[in-house]
Amino acid sequence: MRFSAQRDVLNTAAQITQRAVAQRSPMPVLSCLLFETSGNTLTVTATDLQFGIRCTVPVNTMEEGAAALPYRHVSSLFSRLPEMEIDVRSDPSDNTIIFTYGESELVLNGYPAEEFPNFPVLPQHAVLKIKQSTFKDMLKKVLFAVASDEHRPVFTGVHMQVNEAGTLTLVATDTRKLAVCEAKLELPADRVINVIVPGKTLNELYKLIEAVEAEIEIYITENQVFFVINNICIMSRLIAGKFPDYKIVLPSRYVCEIKAAVNDLIEAAERVSLLVDPKRNVFNIHFQNNSLIFYFFTGTGRIREEITAELSGEPIDVGFNVRFFLELLRSMDSEEVIIQLSGRDSPAMFKPAGDDSYFSILVPAIA
């Protein structure tokens, strides 16, 4: 293999793909990036067998081939090479790659390319296409609710559904918080979709997609999902199991409803968070006519925050985990939020004012 490319091109491909490198694996080759040239295209791949990223970039190819190199060394190298054309050639006899830049040369030891696992074949047709901006906004609104407890794998993913009417729904929950976001597709999906995508995969996807009109293509097989954005392909295994029906936890009635400015709530909660016990993170809110009162007493001190709000129904006191409360509010792209309460110990619903496509549920906590 031999090709040449600008340093920035190589660095970008390495930085994108290294997100999928296996951090702990008995197979040393999984700590590598696979470089393959075909025509005047370089494909860089990384995978931990459950999750993978492939990125293609244009290069000047003199000889086609492939080589696998430890990602730590090669990604660090690309970020430190001078901004110039880099000549890259492999020596299959000893699995080395030689990088030539100007009058300098650096040699890295690698692994045989044939030891690197094959990247799954992309299905022929995408089942779903959606604007990057729309999908990124939806991910922002639900990812905070994904569970991190690996003992309950279903909750570590996002339930992705497309119904016959062409509505895409994303649902995430860790049983203490829940987020549901819907969007009507401009282009209908090829079929009804009902899968659970790992939260880790969607977190990495969120970092890569941009708030632009360009589309992201989604391909789904029996146990894998592929997201294709321009020259990047993200592959992930789906989570097996049945996602719980979130509708059974939705309150049927409310005793109190309040409308308040999202920024006011965030700023007040951030100040309260300075005093709460970091082991429990719980604070109280008193919902009353025309205002919300945040209050907390601790050995460190006390705080009382009052903000303007519109209330209908009965005044009520409720405790919340301040970290969850802030994560929920920061996920909203809205100036105002409506909070509906059905009791001191019952789940509270949060909805952006004037937007029925998204809501979240937060289970109260005892201060």
Image: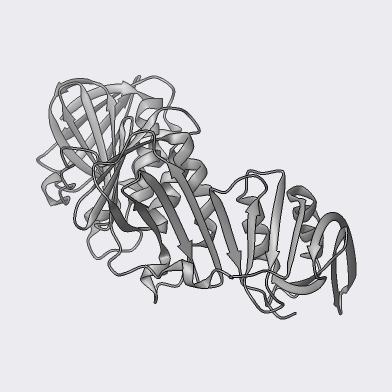
Which of these two is toward me, 67 or 328?
328
**Position in image of residue 204 (x %, y %):** 42, 48
Say which residue appears at 53% left-offset and 64% top-offset: 178
Q: Position of residue 273 (x, y in %)?
A: 76, 65
- Corner quadrant of residue 325: bottom right
User: Is 3 or 309 nearer to us in this picture?
Assistant: 309
**Which residue corresponds to the image point at 43% horizontal and 39% vertical from the top-left?**
208
The colour scheme applied to this rendered structure is one colour
At 18% from the left edge and 48% from the top edge, which residue is drawn? 111
Left or right: 154 with respect to 355?
left
In this rendering, the count of numbered labels is 0
346 left or right of 6 in image:
right
Residue 176: percent from the left, percent from the top? 56, 72
Q: Give the vertical position of 253 relative to 72 (above or below).
A: below
Residue 282 as seen in the image, left or right of residue 43:
right
Rendered position, 270 above or below 190: below
Out of 297 and 60, give the one closest to the viewer. 297
Q: Is residue 276 visible?
A: no
Quadrant position of the N terminus in the picture:
top left
Residue sitting at x 18%, y 40%: 67
Q: In the picture, residue 286 is in which quadrant?
A: bottom right
**Residue 364 can be seen, yes or no:** yes
Q: Quadrant of the C terminus?
A: bottom right
Query: Where does residue 147 sit, x and y in percent of width and height?
Result: 48, 67
| In front of the other: 150 or 300 | 150
Left or right? Give the position of 39 relative to 356: left
